[in-house]
């Protein structure tokens, strides 16, 4: 059990150090295009992906997909090379931060665009008689995109094996969710008969446990379901575009997923994991920039 927790923490630290390094590379002018980091949302990525079957399940991420990709592949080298626009990147440097593809993993930078595609992929798996499920990651701001409601409808009507994962980080860029959406996003899919599980997205163990239960429900052919993760972005939306109150960010720092999980192990073990992740990321960057 503790070995499993260490693995989850190791993956979260790898994501944290990669994202921090990418912001630094961006400020040095070395990044092609833009980056959206998932600082603060590492437990969502690691908790969900670790509960899936990576051989067969389909993961469809969005503009904020580095953490999802690293949780899937642990491929720091391929990701950073991709974002630097290098041929060694997972898409030979032509996809960049927002358009990653590797095995059953996809991302799409257009808000909401991946959700109907994922439903189609899930239906294809169902027709093939496979036991795979498809998992789109959706931001709260993306509930303003009409295409996702068509996807919810068809998924429910045709009982597609989809686990919709919502990362409710309270903002779309600089617009608070409360200023963008009427009503409660947690009950949006009630009308389609899609069951929703709401979980603290800052606690990797809780996310993994809930994702495993919801994935099992979907895999059993009971139709689509939604995992709704309450989280917070501790970094800027993209680079410097952050006008949130510092007091609000500081409040959520107490719930930083790395702060939450370090209570599960000794300080020495946590520090070793952190140090290893930092040195892995810095040696990848050194090699890529050499
Ligand atoms: C169709 C479309 N409109 C606008 C954008 C620009 N854009 C990128 S991310 C973003 C906000 C997304 O908010 P949310 O869905 O909550 O995801 P988060 O950034 O919080 O992870 C916007 C407006 C886009 N990528 N696609
Ligand atoms: Mg958001």
Image (tube, rainbow, N blue to C red):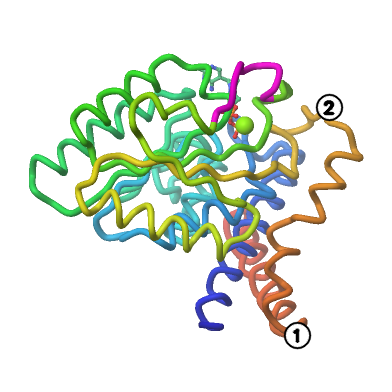
Residue at 56 percent across and 45 percent down: it is: 229
Near-viewer residue (127 or 157): 157
Q: Badge 2: how crowded within 10 Å, few (<14), some, or many (20+)?
A: few
Quadrant in the picture for the C terminus: bottom right
Q: What crowding class fits label 1: few (fewer than 14 Cα within 10 Å), some (14-19), or many (20 or more)?
A: few
Left or right: residue 180 compared with residue 267: left
Hey, which quadrant is residue 161 in on the image?
Answer: top left
Q: Sequence order check: which comes first, mark 1 or mark 2?
A: 2
The label number, if any, that marks residue 268 in the structure image: 1
Question: Is 246 left, or right, of 16 in this rendering?
Answer: right
Q: Is residue 177 above or below residue 3?
A: above
Q: Is residue 203 above or below residue 173?
A: below
Q: Residue visible at 27% across and 32% down?
A: 119
Picture quadrant of residue 53: bottom left
Q: For residue 180: magenta?
A: yes
x and y percentages locating residue 22 in the rendered image:
66, 47
Q: Is residue 173 above or below residue 98?
A: above
Q: Which residues are magenta?
A: 177-185
Label 2: which secondary element = loop
Q: Quadrant of ligand 1?
A: top right
Residue 279 image offset from top left, x and y in percent: 67, 70
Tell me the number on the disc at residue 243. 2
Count of numbered circles on the image? 2
Q: Secondary structure at mark 1?
A: helix
Looking at the picture, how far across and down is residue 45, in whole percent? Answer: 52, 52
- Residue sitting at 8 percent across and 44 percent down? 128
Residue at 44%, 41% (x, y): give it: 196
- Is 17 magenta? The answer is no
């Amino acid at each position: 059990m503790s070995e499993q927790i260490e693995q989850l923490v190791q993956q979260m630290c790898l994501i944290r150090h990669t994202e921090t390094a990418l912001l630094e590379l961006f400020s040095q002018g070395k990044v092609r295009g833009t980056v959206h980091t998932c600082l603060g949302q590492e437990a969502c990525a690691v908790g969900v992906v670790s509960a899936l079957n990576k051989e067969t399940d389909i993961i469809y991420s969005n503009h904020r997909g580095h953490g999802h990709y690293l949780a899937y592949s642990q491929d720091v080298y391929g990701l950073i090379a991709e974002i630097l626009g290098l041929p060694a990147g997972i898409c030979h440097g032509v996809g960049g931060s927002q358009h990653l593809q590797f095995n059953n993993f996809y991302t799409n930078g257009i808000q909401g665009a991946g959700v109907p595609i994922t439903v189609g992929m899930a239906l294809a798996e169902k027709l093939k008689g496979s036991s795979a499920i498809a998992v789109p990651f959706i931001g709260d701001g993306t509930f303003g995109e009409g295409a996702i409601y068509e996807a919810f409808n068809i998924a429910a009507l045709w009982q597609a094996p989809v686990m919709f994962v919502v990362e409710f980080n309270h903002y779309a860029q600089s617009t608070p969710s409360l200023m963008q959406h009427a009503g409660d996003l947690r009950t949006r899919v009630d009308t389609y008969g899609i069951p929703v599980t709401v979980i603290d997205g800052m606690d990797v163990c809780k996310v993994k446990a809930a994702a495993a239960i919801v994935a099992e429900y979907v895999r059993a052919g009971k139709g689509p379901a939604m995992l709704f993760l309450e989280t917070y972005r501790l970094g800027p939306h993209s680079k410097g575009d952050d006008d949130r109150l510092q007091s609000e960010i500081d409040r959520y720092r107490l719930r930083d997923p790395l702060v939450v999980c370090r209570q599960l192990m000794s300080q020495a073990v946590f520090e070793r994991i952190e140090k290893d992740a930092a040195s892995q990321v810095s040696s990848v960057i050194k090699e890529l920039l050499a």
